[in-house]
Image (spheres, rainbow, N blue to C red):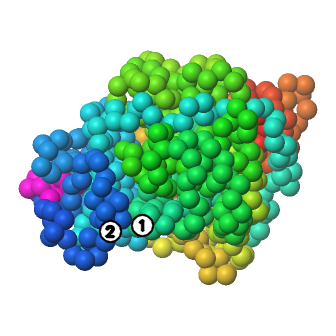
């Protein structure tokens, strides 16, 4: 990746930044003045069921099984996100209860007032808040220290909070014995040796999408209920993947929400999950929607909250047994759904010693990772067990408790369960951090749909208010921030067959200590790189890797990749780097590399950086 910077570009951008800053300060003053009056996300909605409109009552009935839901129900009205956010903080007060949560916002994906995703944590804890809106349909999860809530949409009547005690249902959270995996039960899928297919200078990759999940519901379940729970389940699952450092290949997407005539045949959810996988009409729906995984919502009275076909017999991942069931009479449906889907990849509970030797969930510091089933107090956290992640100095796993590795290792197998649909998808490719006033290059990556593609880029310092209309596969931007050290890019890709997709990227922006210039530059124009400043991340990697270093002056740097035997795997590439901090990105996923240790070498004249990087192919266990 080539990051260019020129002095005149910086000067022009500073003028723009000052002008924008003045406007932003004025707008921020108005926002703060309004926010001081009331900045709570939730407002009291219609007080009771009888005050709802006909449509609201139908939605309420569907979400509560004709008002038989055993947990707490609260009708609220969600304030527009742009009005409730203040300095990356959000206040949530549950009407009528006095519960108040101060949320620290971690990420914002915002298209407009009707389409967004916001993720944050309650204070400095691992409890999560997820807020989403899809074409105005709002949903989400609020995890409090003692009580938690699922947010479901009531249309024009507001939103319904389905509340429950955090420990409710913990004794029967998951079917007994569920969650094993066996190595190499399914044939391994070789990586695509051709890698990216360049076209018009853009990264146009082979047609693949995320793992597709079909959500089914029976005759006694409302489609409104199924849709709300489906979207919330997807959000919880994908946020757990992101939080845990799992590769994006494990992300899931909606294949569809469909009704089924399948009926419960046994009070044992394991037996019913097996029967579901053997039902011809369900298999036809799965193939019709090209779904890799299937999850059924039901109101049957199983003694377990969720389950999959017994893995002690039917090992996961297994394409013919990729089916799960979740009972809607239980609290926190989306967390149960994400938990069960994770079993289908091969994740185990914390106390199961069969299957993959590293497949167990984990309990630490009084909390349960997503696929743990222990009785520790508090909510499940949106993390997979992972010894490489820590919280307050405590690791989230160890050698035998590493669900993150399971997800990384087995995602490619699950992805290959069904044929690939031609659904357009894409994302922004570029550095996730940088210095303000330095110019960085970002790139559009497109998959599926029909070429050629068109691109539209927009920028923001708050993740909500976007401006700009740059087009083309590449976008050069001088980073800046509005006091929060965040910068956001939004990319809209349109394929020639009429499909569109929007993606966002959040970038951390450091202050440039010298206003874009380095003091005391040497006259010989040499490249000075302090060994302590040069790092490679992520390490290990299954694809993209960044070399981060400091240079005394603008110069050209040659970068290559060799193995420990000195064989060259990436020929020397020339990058134009700026004075100060630089980030050079390489994509190793399409180089045909075997698993092992390699050396990233950056050289200018007699100056050399050598950094080891561990490459682990995502498609290999």
Q: Residue at x 60, y 41 (%)?
A: 270
Where residue 349 appears, as percent x and y from the top left, is: 56, 28
Q: Residue at x 34, y 51 (%)?
A: 150
Q: Is residue 155 left or right of residue 74?
A: right
Separation of residues labelled 1 and 2 (CA atoms)? 8 Å
Q: Residue at x 19, y 71 (%)?
A: 52
Q: Which residues are magenta?
A: 36-44
Where residue 295 appears, as percent x and y from the top left, is: 57, 54
Quadrant in the picture for the C terminus: top right
Q: Is residue 27 left or right of residue 584?
A: left
User: Which residue of the protein is positioned furthest toward the bottom in this rendering?
Assistant: 497
Where residue 139 appears, as percent x and y from the top left, is: 36, 58
Q: Residues within 10 Å of mark 2 (few under 14, many from 20)?
A: many
Q: Would you place residue 159 above or below residue 413 in this image?
A: below
Q: To which residue does mark 2 refer?
A: 59
In the foreground, 400 or 595: 400
Instruction: Using the rendered image of the protein, determine whether residue 340 is visible from the camera's viewpoint.
Output: no
**Circles 1 and 2: CB distance less than 8 Å?**
yes
Q: Is residue 62 left or right of residue 601?
A: left
Secondary element under disc 1, as helix, strand or loop, is loop
User: Which residue of the protein is positioned furthest toward the left in this rendering?
Assistant: 37
Secondary element under disc 2, as helix, strand or loop, is helix
Q: To which residue does mark 1 refer?
A: 222
């Amino acid at each position: 990746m080539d990051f260019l910077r020129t002095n005149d570009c910086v000067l022009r951008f500073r003028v723009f930044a000052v002008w924008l800053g003045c406007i932003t300060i004025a707008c921020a003053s108005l926002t703060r003045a309004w926010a001081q009056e009331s900045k709570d996300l939730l407002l009291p909605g219609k007080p009771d069921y009888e005050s709802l409109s006909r449509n609201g009552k139908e939605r309420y009935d569907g979400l509560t099984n004709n008002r038989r839901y055993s947990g707490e129900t609260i009708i609220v009205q969600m304030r527009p996100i742009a009005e409730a956010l203040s300095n990356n903080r959000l206040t949530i007060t549950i009407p009528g209860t006095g519960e108040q949560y101060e949320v620290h916002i971690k990420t914002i994906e915002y298209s407009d007032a009707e389409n967004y995703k916001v993720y944050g944590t309650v204070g400095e804890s691992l409890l999560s808040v997820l807020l989403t809106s899809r074409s105005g349909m709002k949903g989400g999860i609020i995890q409090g220290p003692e009580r938690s809530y699922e947010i479901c949409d009531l249309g024009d009547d507001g939103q319904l909070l389905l509340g429950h005690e955090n420990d409710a249902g913990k004794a029967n959270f998951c079917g007994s014995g569920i969650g094993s995996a066996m190595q190499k039960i399914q044939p391994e899928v070789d990586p695509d040796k051709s890698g990216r297919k360049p076209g018009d200078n853009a990264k146009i990759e082979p047609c693949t999408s995320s793992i597709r999940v079909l959500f089914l519901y029976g005759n006694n379940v409302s489609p409104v209920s199924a849709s709300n729970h489906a979207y919330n389940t997807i959000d919880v699952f994908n946020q757990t993947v992101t939080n845990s450092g799992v590769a994006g290949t494990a992300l899931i997407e909606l294949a569809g929400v469909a009704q089924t005539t399948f009926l419960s045949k046994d009070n044992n959810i394991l037996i019913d999950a097996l029967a579901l996988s053997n039902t011809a009409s369900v298999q036809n729906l799965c193939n019709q929607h090209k779904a890799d995984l299937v999850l059924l919502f039901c109101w049957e009275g199983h003694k377990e909250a969720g389950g999959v076909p017994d893995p002690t017999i039917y090992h996961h991942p297994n394409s013919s047994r990729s089916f799960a069931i979740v009972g809607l009479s239980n609290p926190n449906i989306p967390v149960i759904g994400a938990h069960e889907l994770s079993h289908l990849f091969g994740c185990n509970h914390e106390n199961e010693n069969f299957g993959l030797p590293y497949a167990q969930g984990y309990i630490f510091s009084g909390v349960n990772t997503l696929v743990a089933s222990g009785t520790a107090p508090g909510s499940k956290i949106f993390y997979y067990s992972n010894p490489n992640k820590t919280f307050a100095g405590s690791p989230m796993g160890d050698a035998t408790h590493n669900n993150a590795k399971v997800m990384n290792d087995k995602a490619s197998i699950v992805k290959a369960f069904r044929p690939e649909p031609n659904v357009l998808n894409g994302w922004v490719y570029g550095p996730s951090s940088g210095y303000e006033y330095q110019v960085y290059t970002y790139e559009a990556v497109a998959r599926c749909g029909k070429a050629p593609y068109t691109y539209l880029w927009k920028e923001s310092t708050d993740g909500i208010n976007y401006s700009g209309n740059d087009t083309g596969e590449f976008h050069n931007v001088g980073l800046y921030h509005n006091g929060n050290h965040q910068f956001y890019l939004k990319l809209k890709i349109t394929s020639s067959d009429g499909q569109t997709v929007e993606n966002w990227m959040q970038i951390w922006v450091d202050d440039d200590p010298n206003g874009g210039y380095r003091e005391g530059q040497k006259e010989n124009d040499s490249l000075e790189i302090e060994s302590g400043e040069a790092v490679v991340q992520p390490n290990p990697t299954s694809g993209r890797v960044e070399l981060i270093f400091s240079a005394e002056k603008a110069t050209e740097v040659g970068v290559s990749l060799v193995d420990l035997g000195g064989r060259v795997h990436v020929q020397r590439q020339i990058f134009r780097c700026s004075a100060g901090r630089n980030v050079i990105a390489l994509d190793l996923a399409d180089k045909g590399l075997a698993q092992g240790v390699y050396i990233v070498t950056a050289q200018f004249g007699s100056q050399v950086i050598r950094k080891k990087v561990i490459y682990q192919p995502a498609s290999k266990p």
